[in-house]
Amino acid sequence: MNRIFAIIIFTGIPLVIAGAIFHWNDILMFFLSCLSIIALAGVIGRATESLAIVSGPRVGGLLNATFGNAVELIISIFTLKAGMIGIVLASLTGSVLGNLLLVLGLSFFAGGLKFKRQNFSIHDARYNSGLLIFAVIVAFVIPEIFSMTLNPQKTLSLSIGISVILITLYLAGLFFKLVTHRGVFGSSDKEEGETEIPEWTKRKSIWVLLLSTVAVAFVSERLVQTFETIGDKFGWTELFIGVIVVAIIGNAAEHFSAITMAMKNKMDVTVEIAVGSTLQVAMFVAPVLVLVSLLMPEPMPLVFTVPELVAMITATLLVINLSNDGESNWFEGLILFAAYLIMGIGFFLL
Amino acid sequence: MNRIFAIIIFTGIPLVIAGAIFHWNDILMFFLSCLSIIALAGVIGRATESLAIVSGPRVGGLLNATFGNAVELIISIFTLKAGMIGIVLASLTGSVLGNLLLVLGLSFFAGGLKFKRQNFSIHDARYNSGLLIFAVIVAFVIPEIFSMTLNPQKTLSLSIGISVILITLYLAGLFFKLVTHRGVFGSSDKEEGETEIPEWTKRKSIWVLLLSTVAVAFVSERLVQTFETIGDKFGWTELFIGVIVVAIIGNAAEHFSAITMAMKNKMDVTVEIAVGSTLQVAMFVAPVLVLVSLLMPEPMPLVFTVPELVAMITATLLVINLSNDGESNWFEGLILFAAYLIMGIGFFLL
Amino acid sequence: MNRIFAIIIFTGIPLVIAGAIFHWNDILMFFLSCLSIIALAGVIGRATESLAIVSGPRVGGLLNATFGNAVELIISIFTLKAGMIGIVLASLTGSVLGNLLLVLGLSFFAGGLKFKRQNFSIHDARYNSGLLIFAVIVAFVIPEIFSMTLNPQKTLSLSIGISVILITLYLAGLFFKLVTHRGVFGSSDKEEGETEIPEWTKRKSIWVLLLSTVAVAFVSERLVQTFETIGDKFGWTELFIGVIVVAIIGNAAEHFSAITMAMKNKMDVTVEIAVGSTLQVAMFVAPVLVLVSLLMPEPMPLVFTVPELVAMITATLLVINLSNDGESNWFEGLILFAAYLIMGIGFFLL
């Protein structure tokens, strides 16, 4: 896997640079950028993982929690800079839907074909479902509904307040999970004696992390510039590009590992990747983008479109209901995937 | 019971035929048709049951799953043919509400008066609640919300896509329940040695099924023609006729068995009838009607009115919450019934 | 505590009387009235408690269930009389949000700082969550949605019907909890041998109850008259006064006991106060006010504003999700408190 990533990166990035200089066709650039970003995201994931193992569980958890969606954050910042607020919100929505429905769905399904029933920590499931409801159903719904009667300035104030609260609660949640209530959470997959060996050394991990992040930033800027042409050529709306395309690119590497883990019956890791990543997007990436947008020409309030919000709410209710017994099977996976399909068709037509 | 059904059928149907020829008063025709359909539905239920026992659990499950709401399907097709799309959607809503709130409510209540607590399979409850959320909260809500910004043509495309997905998932669910995960589900009521004896022979069941279905089709066509007059005379809106009247007629026989079973403390059967029937309506009858409507002069998108949808969503959330502990008592029954009453008043006033 | 209450009452009430006669400044009157009401509510709570112990569990439960929100009921009736229907509905909303999010949040948090995990009866939690969904998500949502297409007269009829159903179900719930299913509910905190000793004699309790109630009525009328000035001076909207200010004043004494109990690890009492009080407001105080309003110049339909309703729905879903495992910890408390904060900011800006 590392070799494939390396090949893509070392041929993809020079090509993107060449394309940027010689103004290649947008469609070609779109595909080159996508491929490079997927590979870079994979490498960043591995570097973070290695660094996390070296740093011990607490700092490691923190690292995973901040770098886990670094790629997405970077793409979004460049999209914000280009003034395409609609695509940023759509790609946040897409991350939530992609993680909850597509990744968890395919993981439950693929795992369920091999194992009749798979189990994961009920404590994790409950912790996750409480925060999912808080983030999606309280923190996202309130500004949406209240913004209908508030003026834009007050809507922005409300968004800023909520963003600060979300980030604070996200950090408090890490403190809860890693410090005060450590040991309660999801270590059931790991055997007692098993110590994880980092793939790369600390030094190498840090370098890879730094260089890849710079590369992602560079490629993301090119990618964002192709959106308009791509939308016109393929008949994709801004919403569809954000919800489906950007979300899949930004999360592809992660998706791949979640499904692999499910097939090894390591469901706690799968759930942690899929739901943990959703929470990170909703409680950390989204509010950080709201705050970052204050430095941009146009600020971004935390107000999704109604279809986006409804899709996230229904996805959340479905996932909570299916996962809070700590068990999964292929049919539950199929239900989640079917829900993703329905929403995908909806956003395509919109 | 069979004798009563037979008497009603053998006096009711000739009268309906006579009435159709001599153009009797619509109100008389309405009551004659209703009575005949209730009795025919009872007989169809018994024939299906007998056939299911003879055919073994898998084919039997499939038979129950397709013929269980045959009467409703037939009435709806004739209503569609008469162009009354509003009544079709309303009667689907009414089936969902009637099964979830009225039938389950009266069953829990009646059973709870005799037994302090009654239990049913938690596996069934979870399977049901996952699919209920999928069908009502994802598959019905998405077209509603998205249709607000889509043009009618695209709304119809979305409805068709969702209908295909719903039917596929419904069949996959049967495969899951009857094949890959058999044994997990709700056989706790039956003692091991107990073999069920079919009421009728295979031959008789098939004949009864065929003839009754033809009769239901004939009577339904008369019934549909009386709706307009009935609405005017009694001051009932289209919505009220669909949600309350048609739904109760189409499901009366079923309702009766569910309550009888609850009073015998066979709660798994009760839940299977009430919730299973809801799922069948939502995941099979409704999407089939959408597809059938494409052959009719006016196609029917899967878009309920807002009050209908909200009633179904709230009913779903209430039932899931009350049933996912696998226990019931008289007070839970009363809560469900009270919710039905509130919605009934609402639809009456609307 | 009693001494502090006594001092506040015996200095506060004469001052309120003096102020009423000499037309003191509204801001001063607002603070005097608030303080007096908080103290009176504390005293009423104690009197009810003593009376409940003397009267045995059944009558006692009934007493608590009717007098528990007496103060709120009285303030609301005077607000209704002054024609400020918006504030009445807002203060009902505020009571629900305050009890579910603020009180339960602070209790879980404060208790969680002392105890790693705290437990409460799962039977209580389920009973509560069923009724919460019924009251907030069925009985409050249906009139809201249906009122969009109903004329005011029909909306009022629907409200009256729902109010009668709510009160009936509330009484049936008491019958269930105190008579048919007694013993199932929340006595896990009390040791077997422990008999409660009433603070006051029966005679004293009744006198305190009567006099305090009269005093609350008098002070409430003054308080209501200051709302307009207060809103202007502090830039508070009617909604904010109702949802946050009135709700906190009316429930302060109760809030204090809930948190105290949590810190003593008597979580069943805490949950009973917070959620029990919510149910009482939603299923008893609110519908009684609808019925009482029929005697007033302007009747009050059971139709909240959309932000109020959405806040209550999301609060309900969050609390049900966090509490239905019968366990709490500091982080769950923080989540609830954060949700209250978000809504508080929202209502302040509205």
Image (cartoon, coloured by chain):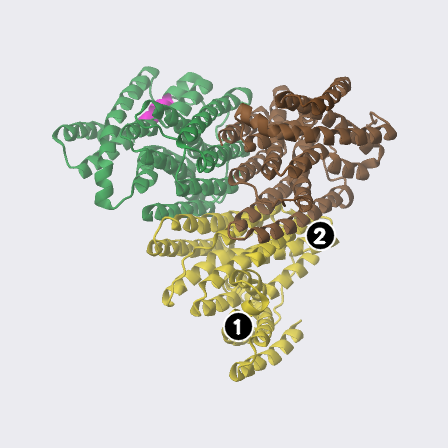
Chain colours: A yellow, B brown, C green
Picture layout, residue C267 above or below residue A59: above
For residue A266, which numbered disc appears in the image?
Answer: none
Q: Which residue is mark 1?
A: A226
Which amino acid lies under the numbered mark 1 shown in the image of this protein? Thr
Residue at left offset 26%, top offset 22% = C214
Give the percent coordinates (x, y) of residue A121.
Answer: 61, 49
Indicate left or right for C272 with B211 as reference. left
Q: Are marks 1 and 2 on the same chain?
A: yes
Direction from residue C299 to residue A272 in the image, left or right? right
The stretch in magenta equals: C44-50
- In this view, the residue in front, C327 or C157, is C157
The N terminus of chain C sits in image quarter: top left
x, y percent for residue B188? 73, 32
Please check the rendered image and state whether residue A213 is part of the magenta-colored stretch, yes or no: no
Is residue C106 visible in this depiction of the protein? no
Mark 1: which secondary structure? helix
The percent coordinates of residue B104 (x first, y second) are 62, 29
Tell me the residue that label 2 is attached to.
Answer: A112
Q: Quick one: C93 or B97, which is closer to the camera?
A: B97
Residues marked 1 and 2 touching at CB (< 8 Å): no
Q: Main secondary structure of the magenta part?
A: helix
Q: CA distance from mark 1 to mark 2?
A: 39 Å
